[in-house]
């Protein structure tokens, strides 16, 4: 029996914190993970109403140093995608800490505890605080998450590696920060914004297939391979400051890195038709990108065993 980490399943949390870091002293990581999980348990017990949850995930360089080649075999470093103003940079790090809860104060408390647990064994590269807007809308005004898998069974089937595998309970992760240019976005008419997404803005209705622009976000990401939908579990939330950088903290979990990668290639002009997503032209720019593997809780408690 393998238990997935806790930040993968909940899909209504109102606050999130994302921290990416590099590992300086590998032997300290196991004890740090154990301390971080103890802090999580303590804070969950103190504030059960906050639904506090945590995922700790690792980049390919650290993971391969554990010599667990039969686990997370698909894991690799993120590579830059696309070209020019619609490119996606690679900002790969060793460690991702993903916190979700219904209370920003509790998220902050856990983040401090997790960072204390890792202490000087890591150096933090970036920290992003995110929040849920009314009706789960992005800062662009569109509802985000509608077609996400719903219900624990579907979320686990799509987001988490099944029990027949040595890495059961684990999940591949894409973390990408997107900076929006809302002034530019708001120069586009409602029709042009809806064309870019291929859903209506006010009532969130999907356009019929025949009415979708081939470069719309839905046309680029609603993909099938041999008749099977390439599904992923998204837990993205808006982030940022009103006066400075803001946009979408995009995070996706999946039992196979392949599903996530095929969608990215299709958005960034690296699929067969070489088209890019209209959102990259009209709304947003990718400013970070990294792949991670979130092992099961049992494996996180015994990374070396
Ligand atoms: C700034 C970047 C992005 C924005 C603003 C954005 C926004 C949206 C919106 C508004 C929807 C429609 C509602 C929904 O079903 O959630 C959507 C759907 C979706 N997005 Fe994104 N998204 C972004 C990046 C990405 C990335 C990087 C991926 C994949 C790696 C992705 C994958 C998907 C998928 C799979 C769907 C559902 C498609 C369907 O089956 O209809 N999105 N996104």
Image: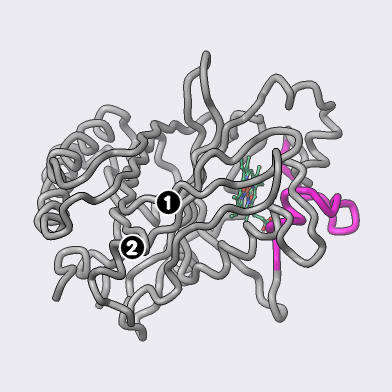
Q: Is residue 199 visible?
A: no
Magenta stretch, residue numbers: 203-223
Apparent side of residue 45 relative to residue 19 in the rendered image (left or right)? left
Residue 115 placement (x, y as % from top left): 19, 39
Is residue 215 depicted above or below 247 in this figure?
Answer: below
Identified at 73% across, 55% down, the residue is 269
Label 2 SS: helix
Left or right: residue 283 compared with residue 148: right
Q: Main secondary structure of the magenta part?
A: loop
Q: Position of residue 251 (x, y in %)?
A: 48, 49
Magenta stretch holds residue 220: yes
Crowd class of label 1 (few under 14; some 14 to 19; many from 20; radius 10 Å)? many
- Identify which residue is drawn at 73% across, 64% down: 271
Q: Nearer the viewer, residue 270 or 45?
A: 270
**SS state under label 1:** loop
Which residue occupies the extreme top position in the image? Answer: 243
For the residues labelled 2 and 1, say whether their Cβ atoms are less than 8 Å apart.
yes
**Residue for badge 2:** 61
Left or right: where does residue 73 sit relative to residue 50?
A: right
Residue 137 falls in which quadrant of the image?
Answer: top right
Residue depicted at 36% across the width and 36% down the height: 126
């Amino acid at each position: 029996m393998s238990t997935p980490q806790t930040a993968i399943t909940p899909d209504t949390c109102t606050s999130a914190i994302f921290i990416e870091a590099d590992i300086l002293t590998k032997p300290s990581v196991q004890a740090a993970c154990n301390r971080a999980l103890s802090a999580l348990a303590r804070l969950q017990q103190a504030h059960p109403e906050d639904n506090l949850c945590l995922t700790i995930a690792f980049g390919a360089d650290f993971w391969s140093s554990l010599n667990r080649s039969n686990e997370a075999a698909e894991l690799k470093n993120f590579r830059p995608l696309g070209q020019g103003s619609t490119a996606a940079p690679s900002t790969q790090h060793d460690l991702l800490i993903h916190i979700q809860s219904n209370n920003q104060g509790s998220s902050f408390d856990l983040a401090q505890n997790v960072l204390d647990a890792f202490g000087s064994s890591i150096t933090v590269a970036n920290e992003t605080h995110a929040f849920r807007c009314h009706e789960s809308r992005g800062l662009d005004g569109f509802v985000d998450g509608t077609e996400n898998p719903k219900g624990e069974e579907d979320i686990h089937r799509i987001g988490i590696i099944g029990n027949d595998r040595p890495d059961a309970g684990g999940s591949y992760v894409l973390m990408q920060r997107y900076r929006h240019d809302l002034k530019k976005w708001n120069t586009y008419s409602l029709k042009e914004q809806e064309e870019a997404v291929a859903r209506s803005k006010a009532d969130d209705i999907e356009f019929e297939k025949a009415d979708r622009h081939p470069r719309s976000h839905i046309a680029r990401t609603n993909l099938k391979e041999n008749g099977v939908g390439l599904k992923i579990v998204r837990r993205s939330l808006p982030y940022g400051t009103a006066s400075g950088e803001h946009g979408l903290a995009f995070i996706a979990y999946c039992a196979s890195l392949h599903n996530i990668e095929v969608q990215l290639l299709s958005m960034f002009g690296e699929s067969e038709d070489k088209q890019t997503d209209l959102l990259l032209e009209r709304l947003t720019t990718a400013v970070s990108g990294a792949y991670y593997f979130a092992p099961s809780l049992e494996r996180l408690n015994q990374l070396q065993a």
